[in-house]
C-alpha cells in the first residue's frame, strides 16, 4: 500500500509538470559518456576510422519503489567519408509510474567534421527527432478515490474520458564538439523549438543546455598496456534544474574504473 501511494504521488507530480508551465527534466544517465549520442549529437561518427559504434543503455531510478522511472536507449553511429562526417540513429523510451506514462523518441543524427589543423578537430552535429507521449488515464489514482481508513476504494469523479492520451511532435537539437589528441570539450542544446508536450493545456518542453569537458593523459605503462587518467566535468541546465557531474576514470587496456560525484547548486546528490 505504501509503495502504491508513493508511485501514485510521483506520477501525479509528473502530470502536474506536463499540464502546467512548470519545468520538466529529461532523463539523465550517470555514465553519460556511455551514451554519447544522447549527450551531444556531434558525437555521431566520432570514431573516424569508419568502424560503427553501437550503445545499449538501461536506467532504473529509485528501483526500491518499483520501476518508477525506467529508461532504455539504443544507438548506432558511423563515420562516412562521402558525407564529410558521421551519421547516427537513436531510439529511447522512458516509462514513468510503472508504465502509465510512456515517452518514445526516435532520432536521426548527422555531424560534420572539420579538421582545423593536424592537432585540432571540430564536429558540428544536428539531431531531428520525433517524440510520442502516451498516458494511460485509466490506471491513474486521483484524490477522490482515497478513503482515509480503507485506502483506494472509490471511483473517481474526474472527467478523464475526454482528455487526450497521446501527444506527438517533432523535436530538434544541435551540438558542437572539439578535440585534440588529449583534450575534448563540447556543448549541446536539446529541444530548440520548445515543442508543446501538454495533455491538458500548453506545456512547452524547455531547452536543455549541456557543457562537457575532459581529457586523457598517460600515467605509466604496465606490461603491454598504457595506464591513463581521464578527468571529466559536465554541467546541465534545463530551465530551473541544474546539475554538475565530475570525476575521473583510470584506464588500463579494456579495463576502466573511476569515481564520480553529482550535485545540484543547492546540495550534494550522490557518488557514482
Image (spheres, rainbow, N blue to C red):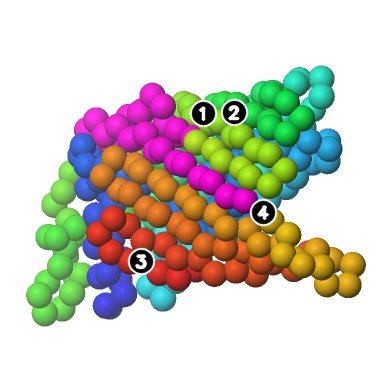
In the rendering, at what x and y percent does residue 134 appear? 41, 43
Q: Quadrant of residue 49?
A: top right
Q: Magenta span: helix, strand or loop, mainly?
A: loop
Residue situated furthest right in the rendering? 224
Name the secondary structure under disc 1.
strand
First in sequence: mark 1 or mark 2?
2
> Which numbered tag is attached to residue 216?
4
Query: Distance between the Cα atoms at labels 4 and 3?
Result: 26 Å
Viewer-proximal residue among 152 and 52:
52
First in sequence: mark 1 or mark 4?
1
Number of dots carrying numbers: 4
First in sequence: mark 4 or mark 3?
4
In percent of the image, x 48 and y 27: which residue is there?
A: 172
> What is the quadrant of the N terminus in the image?
bottom left
Residue at numbered disc 3: 269
Asked if disc 1 and disc 2 are in contact, CB closer than 8 Å, the reply is: yes
In percent of the image, x 64 and y 29: which residue is there?
A: 122
In the rendering, at what x and y percent does residue 47 appear? 76, 40
Query: Distance between the Cα atoms at labels 1 and 2?
Result: 6 Å
Q: Is residue 206 magenta?
A: yes
Residue at numbered disc 1: 174
First in sequence: mark 2 or mark 3?
2
Query: Distance between the Cα atoms at labels 2 and 3?
Result: 31 Å
> Which numbered tag is attached to residue 125?
2
Q: Quadrant of residue 228?
A: bottom right
Query: Distance between the Cα atoms at labels 4 and 2?
Result: 23 Å
Query: Distance between the Cα atoms at labels 1 and 4?
Result: 25 Å
Q: Please give the range of residues in magenta.
A: 188-215
Q: Is residue 129 visible?
A: no
In the rendering, at what x and y percent does residue 199 appear? 29, 37
Amino acid at each position: 500500500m505504501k509503495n502504491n501511494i508513493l508511485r501514485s504521488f510521483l506520477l501525479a507530480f509528473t502530470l502536474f509538470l506536463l499540464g502546467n508551465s512548470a519545468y520538466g527534466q529529461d532523463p539523465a544517465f550517470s555514465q553519460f559518456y556511455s551514451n554519447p549520442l544522447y549527450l551531444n549529437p556531434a558525437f555521431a561518427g566520432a570514431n573516424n576510422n569508419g568502424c560503427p559504434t553501437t550503445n545499449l543503455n538501461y536506467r532504473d531510478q529509485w528501483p526500491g519503489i518499483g520501476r518508477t522511472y525506467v529508461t532504455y536507449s539504443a544507438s548506432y553511429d558511423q563515420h562516412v567519408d562521402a558525407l564529410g562526417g558521421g551519421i547516427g540513429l537513436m531510439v529511447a523510451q522512458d516509462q514513468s509510474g510503472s508504465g502509465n506514462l510512456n515517452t518514445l523518441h526516435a532520432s536521426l543524427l548527422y555531424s560534420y567534421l572539420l579538421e582545423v589543423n593536424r592537432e585540432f578537430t571540430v564536429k558540428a552535429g544536428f539531431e531531428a527527432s520525433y517524440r510520442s507521449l502516451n498516458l494511460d488515464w485509466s490506471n491513474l489514482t486521483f484524490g477522490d478515490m482515497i478513503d482515509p481508513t480503507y485506502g483506494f476504494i472509490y471511483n473517481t469523479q474526474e472527467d478523464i474520458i475526454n482528455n487526450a492520451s497521446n501527444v506527438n511532435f517533432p523535436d530538434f537539437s544541435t551540438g558542437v564538439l572539439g578535440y585534440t589528441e588529449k583534450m575534448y570539450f563540447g556543448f549541446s542544446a536539446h529541444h530548440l523549438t520548445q515543442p508543446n508536450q501538454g495533455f491538458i493545456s500548453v506545456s512547452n518542453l524547455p531547452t536543455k543546455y549541456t557543457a562537457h569537458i575532459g581529457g586523457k593523459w598517460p600515467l605509466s605503462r604496465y606490461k603491454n598496456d598504457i595506464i591513463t587518467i581521464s578527468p571529466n566535468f559536465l554541467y546541465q541546465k534545463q530551465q530551473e534544474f541544474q546539475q554538475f557531474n565530475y570525476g575521473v576514470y583510470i584506464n588500463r587496456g579494456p579495463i576502466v574504473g573511476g569515481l564520480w560525484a553529482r550535485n545540484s547548486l543547492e546540495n550534494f546528490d550522490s557518488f557514482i
